[in-house]
Amino acid sequence: MLLYVDAQYASPYAMSAFVALHEKEVPFRMQTVDLWNGQNREPEYAAISLTQRVPTLVHGDFALSESSAIAEYLHETLPGNPLYPSEPCSRAKARQVQAWLRSDLMPIRQERSTEVIFYGRIGESLSAAAHAAAEKLFAAASALLLTGNENLFGTWCIADVDLALMLNRLVMHGDFVPKHLASYAQRQWKHPSVQLWVQQPRPPLRGG
């Protein structure tokens, strides 16, 4: 298998696919795509990636982009560690969490980019819109995660990675996060396959 990721190793979606592959314990190679210089829009990559984004997984003559689709494909086609809960309602909830985190909370994603996490970048105080998005994030996460629980749905699943990353945008910047949610995010960050991504050597940050 071949996984295309961003050259900065800072994409939360590339990270999610990377973790999913490691959890499945299958050998794979990585190839970087320079998003800064628009390499993802060049014909050679566009011919592989339908959405011209990262990550894209190539498995034989099959290519698939979008991280949640990649996780579902790996979960359904490969043996080994499951990526989603076995119980149908919990599995549907995990997919709901993934879809929500990818489509909402834009003020947090804009004001606390993953450069905060992987490069230590410090931004300005959160705007009113970002504060409102954070409150929405805290309410949803608290409703899903009972205080003290290590994972969302009993056993670890790929949605834990995605939720922890969103929370850690705030935690690692020093913004307020309720203690039980900050503890959850920090525990998830220690997951071995997550740490493999965190420890990737990164080139200097461009653009300031």
Image: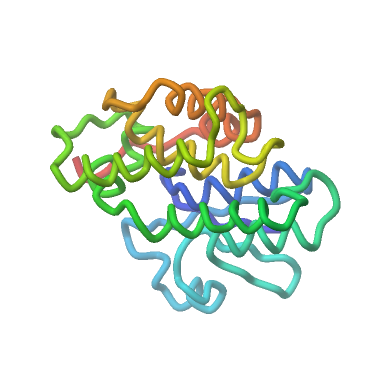
Q: Is residue 198 above or below residue 45?
A: above
Question: Which residue appears farthest toward the right when viewing the image?
Answer: 79
In the rendering, at what x and y percent does residue 188 appear?
56, 29
- Relative placement, left or right, of 17 versus 203 is right
Q: Residue at x 80, y 62 (%)?
A: 77
In the rendering, at what x and y percent does residue 168 appear?
40, 32
Q: Is residue 141 above or below residue 67?
A: above
Q: Is residue 117 above or below residue 88?
A: above
Task: Choose between 52 and 141: the one closer to the eye.
Answer: 141
Task: Choose between 63 and 169: the one closer to the eye.
Answer: 169
In the rendering, at what x and y percent does residue 111 appear?
22, 43
Count the marks: how many? 0
Its colouring scheme is rainbow
Q: Residue at x 56, y 74 (%)?
A: 48
Q: Residue at x 40, y 65 (%)?
A: 39
- Relative placement, left or right, of 208 versus 199 is left
Say which quarter of the image contains residue 124.
top left
In the rendering, at what x and y percent does residue 164 appear?
48, 36
Q: Residue at x 32, y 51 (%)?
A: 105
Location of the N terminus by quadrant is bottom right
Location of the C terminus by quadrant is top left
Say which quarter of the image contains residue 178.
top left
